[in-house]
Amino acid sequence: MVTTTPTPTATFQGALSDWSRLVARSIEGQARLARGSVALARRVAVNDEGRGSAAGRAYLDSLGREAAHYWTEAVALGLGYADGLLSLAQDTAARVLDDVDAAAGPTPVRPDGGDPGVRRIAVALAGIVGSEIATKVTVANNQPRRRAVKFDVGVLTGPDGPFHPPLHLEPASLTLPAGEEGTVGLRLEMRPDLFTRGETYRGEIRVHGGDEAILVLSVRAE
C-alpha cells in the first residue's frame, strides 16, 4: 500500500477551503436570522396597536436580553480565540528555535569549567549501598521566550573507572515559560555491583534549553 503525506501548501489550501465554507455558512445563517427578525417585527407591528400588547413587550424584552447575552458571549469567544492564537504562535516559535538550537549543538564548556556562560551547581548525595537516593533540583528559564529544558546525564567516575549510573530524572524534560522555574526529581539506584561502601563518585548532568548549567554530582556510598 502506498501512502502520501500532504505538503504544507496542500494543508494550507485545505484549511483555507474549510474557512471559506465556514464563512459562507455564517453569512447564510445571519441572512436567515435577519429575514426571520423582519417577519416577526411585522407581526408584532400589526398586532401591537399601542406598543402595549403582550407580544410587543415580549419581543422588546427578549431583544434586549439576547443582545446583551450575544455580546457577552462574543467578547468571551474573541478573547479565547486571541489567547489560543497567541499560544499557538509562541509554541511554534519555540519549536523552530529549539530545532535550531539542537542543530547548533550544546553550548561549549571549557575543560576547566571556567566558561562564564555556564553555571556549575554542586549537588552532594549520600546513600547506603543497596538503597535508593532521591532529591530535587530547581531549573530556570531565563530566556525571553518559552523553552524546552533537557538534561544530558554523563558518567559517574569512581575508583574502578567511569560507568553510566542508573540515574532517573522525573520528568526527563520539561517546557518552561519565559522567566519561570520548574522542579525536577533525581533518583539514583545505589546498586551493589556499581557502588562500593566508603567510596565517592563524581559526575555531571548538563542542563540545556532554559538556563545553561552543569549539575556537578558528588555521590558518597555508605
Image (spheres, helix red, strand yellow):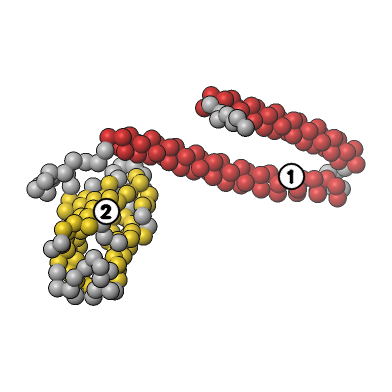
Q: Left of 45 or right of it: where is 207?
A: left
The quarter of the displayed image where residue 146 is located: top left
Rendered residue at 30%/37% (across/down): 101
Which numbered disc covers residue 101? none
Amino acid at dot 2: Val
Element on which disc 2 rests:
strand
Q: Earlier in the sequence, mark 1 or mark 2?
A: 1
Numbered disc total = 2
Name the spot of residue 37 as percent of width and height, x first: 79, 37
Determine the image quadrant of residue 107.
Answer: top left
- For the question of whether residue 179 can be seen, the reply is no
Q: Secondary structure at mark 1?
A: helix
> What residue lies at 61% left-to-right and 47% top-to-bottom?
72
Q: Nearer the viewer, residue 85 or 129?
A: 129
Residue highlighted by disc 1: 63
The residue indicated by pointer 2 is 153
